[in-house]
Image (cartoon, helix red, strand yellow):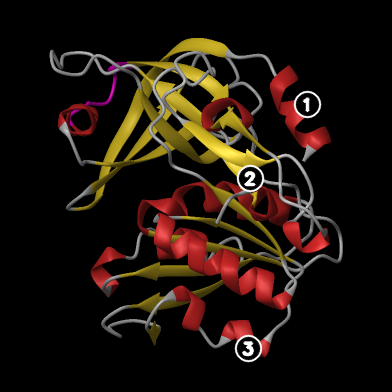
Amino acid sequence: MGKKSTFAAMMKKYLLDLTVKAVERIHERYVLLRLTDEKPLPEMLPGQFVEVRVDGSPGTFLRRPISINFVDREQNELWLLVATVGEGTRRLAELKAGDLLNCLLPLGNGFTAAKQGEKVLLIGGGVGVAPLLYMGAEMQCQGIEPTFLLGARTSKDLLMLDIYKRYGRVHVTTEDGSEGEKGFVTNHSILQQERFDRISTCGPTPMMKAVARLAKAEGIECEVSLENLMACGLGACLCCVEKVKTSPDPSQGGEPQTTNVCVCKDGPVFDTKRLLW
């Protein structure tokens, strides 16, 4: 984590007015924003995020943090998958091609890059699938085949499956059994059939905690992308604080020492061994 965090912290941050190239309604609750710029987009890492300013919404005072869904270098596009859950995100869904969106990016620390020969399982639920697409695409570029395990309530809630299938193997669970295996992601048969070296996951907190417990029981390295409330994205406002361990696991003897960190600056991706879960 140290080298990765240091590298991400050294990356230059940009405040850009990006042009909306397209707004795609992919679900009744989700839109895909495809943004571009006249200049090449900055370097970004899988798992990092963007703070966007919401204009035209008097009740929205703070920027909204949105995971980087994908970076298309050939088309010079940044994709943001937006869940329309409040006034601010509903306003973002109303953007039109040609509009400008003020973005602060890239922010935070991303997922650990996969190594040659390493089997990585990318587990996502709901809008938490968003950062895993870029992670999988980057793995494919390195000649590593990713495995996606994507969960949703019903088949209608599975997002962008056809695109995920371009970059790796895709396995699915739905709570009602309408597609893939019935149940939660932690019940999928792939977890019994194959052995993975690392799990990277993002989604609802209960899901990520269940994945973390499974990984710990199986001795698998695991990273999660936390979704604490983030306002500034720079570690200044302290509204996204998370208490983490600063010493080895208690199983190694003694009580763990803890400290408070800002998820936006020190995360949002954390090794689960650091979390008090």
| Residue range highlighted in magenta | 94-100
- Tag 3: residue type? Gln
Q: Is residue 217 left or right of residue 102?
A: right
Spatial CA distance of label 1 from label 2 is 14 Å
Q: CA distance from mark 1 to mark 3?
A: 36 Å
Identify the residue position indicated by label 1 in the image. 6
Query: Disc 2 marks which amino acid?
Result: Phe
Relative to 190, 56 lies left or right: left
- In terms of secondary structure, where does tag 1 sit? helix
Say which label, 1 or 3, has the lower sequence index: 1
Which is nearer the N-term, disc 1 or disc 2? 1
Residue that appears at 27% across and 64% down: 157
Give the camera-side residue of 73 and 62. Answer: 62
Tell me whether the residue at label 1 lies in contact with that at label 2, contact meaning CB atoms closer than 8 angstroms.
no
Q: Quadrant of the N terminus?
A: top right
Front residue of 4 and 249:
249
Residue for badge 3: 192
Q: CA distance from mark 2 to mark 3?
A: 25 Å
Residue at horizontal 34 percent and vertical 65 percent from the top? 158
Residue 203 against residue 71 in the figure, above or below: below
